[in-house]
């Protein structure tokens, strides 16, 4: 449990973590070297890899390219059980606990378990909570689940606590990739204060201020996908 241990240790000393989310389907292969350079110059501590329709061959190829050029841990963040690659270091073994679709609560996990058993991947069970963010997101569409009401803090907290009690090692508050509104800070604060396990926050964070605010509210790890996808200089504070 090397990667999870590192996350726990960082939390203990209040060292905040940052994951850049790469969607292999959106990668332009001619730009991979450039992208890797930009990731190396960024404050990222982890690479998350995932997407809605990722093909395995691309997945392997991308992770191999990343691993050749950098030492950041590569963590799979799969949309479905086909997105497993032995080339990665770990996988977020997600359970969509905000929803009530059994496929995303247990069915995909049952299908993935025998495949994962044959790999060396570190399995990190993660309670994944989709939060309403002002429009339909890909997670909502694909999982056919409703997000949690962003104003129903009691329900969000109860869900997070149930996720922790079920034995999840991480909790992920997700607004959805490209979300109009990120997870409310008040919600991050409430959940962070009331759970022991590390808290991941992502979706719709579009500036550096947004990252800092999420950290300040209690996020242990922030995920940035779209903003870096749109601008590889996103983390470069000297650019303006
Ligand atoms: C999506 O939380 C991640 O799963 C990242 O979202 O693409 O909006 O940064 P963005």
Image: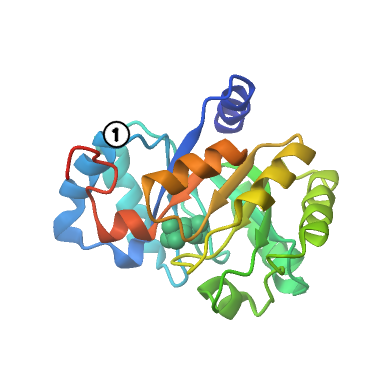
Foreground: 18 or 92? 18
Kindly tell me whether residue 146 is visible in this rendering. yes
Left or right side of 157 for 27: left
Q: How many marks?
A: 1
Q: Secondary structure at mark 1?
A: loop
Name the image quarter holding the N terminus.
top right
Residue 104 location in percent, x, y? Answer: 69, 68
Residue that label 1 marks = 70
Left or right side of 173 for 138: left
Foreground: 46 or 63? 46
Which coloring applies here?
A: rainbow
- Disc 1: CA contacts within 10 A as few (<14), some (14-19) or many (>=20): few
Residue 84 location in percent, x, y? Answer: 51, 56
Foreground: 178 or 111? 178
Residue 170 location in percent, x, y? Answer: 67, 43
Residue 85 location in percent, x, y? Answer: 46, 52
Q: Residue at x 56, y 62 (%)?
A: 175
């Amino acid at each position: 449990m090397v990667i999870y241990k590192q996350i726990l240790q960082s939390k203990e000393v209040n060292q905040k973590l940052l994951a850049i989310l790469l969607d292999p389907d959106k990668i332009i292969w001619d730009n991979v070297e450039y992208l890797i350079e930009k990731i190396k110059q960024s404050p990222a501590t982890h690479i998350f890899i995932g997407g809605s329709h990722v093909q395995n061959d691309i997945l392997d190829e991308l992770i191999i390219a990343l691993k050749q050029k950098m030492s950041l841990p590569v963590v799979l963040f799969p949309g479905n059980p086909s997105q497993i690659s032995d080339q990665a270091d770990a996988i977020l073994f997600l359970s969509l606990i905000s929803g009530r679709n059994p496929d995303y609560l247990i069915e995909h996990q049952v299908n993935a378990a025998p495949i994962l058993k044959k790999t060396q991947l570190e399995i990190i069970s993660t309670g994944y909570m989709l939060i309403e963010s002002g429009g339909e997101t890909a997670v909502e569409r694909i999982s056919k689940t409703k997000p949690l009401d962003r104003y129903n803090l009691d329900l969000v907290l109860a869900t997070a606590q149930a996720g922790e009690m079920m034995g999840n090692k991480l909790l992920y508050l997700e607004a959805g990739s490209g979300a109009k509104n990120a997870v409310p800070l008040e919600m991050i604060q409430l959940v962070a204060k009331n759970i022991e396990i590390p808290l991941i926050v992502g979706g719709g964070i579009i500036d550096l201020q947004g990252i800092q605010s999420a950290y300040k509210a209690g996020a242990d790890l922030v995920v940035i996908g779209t903003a870096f996808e749109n601008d590889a200089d996103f983390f470069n504070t000297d650019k303006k």
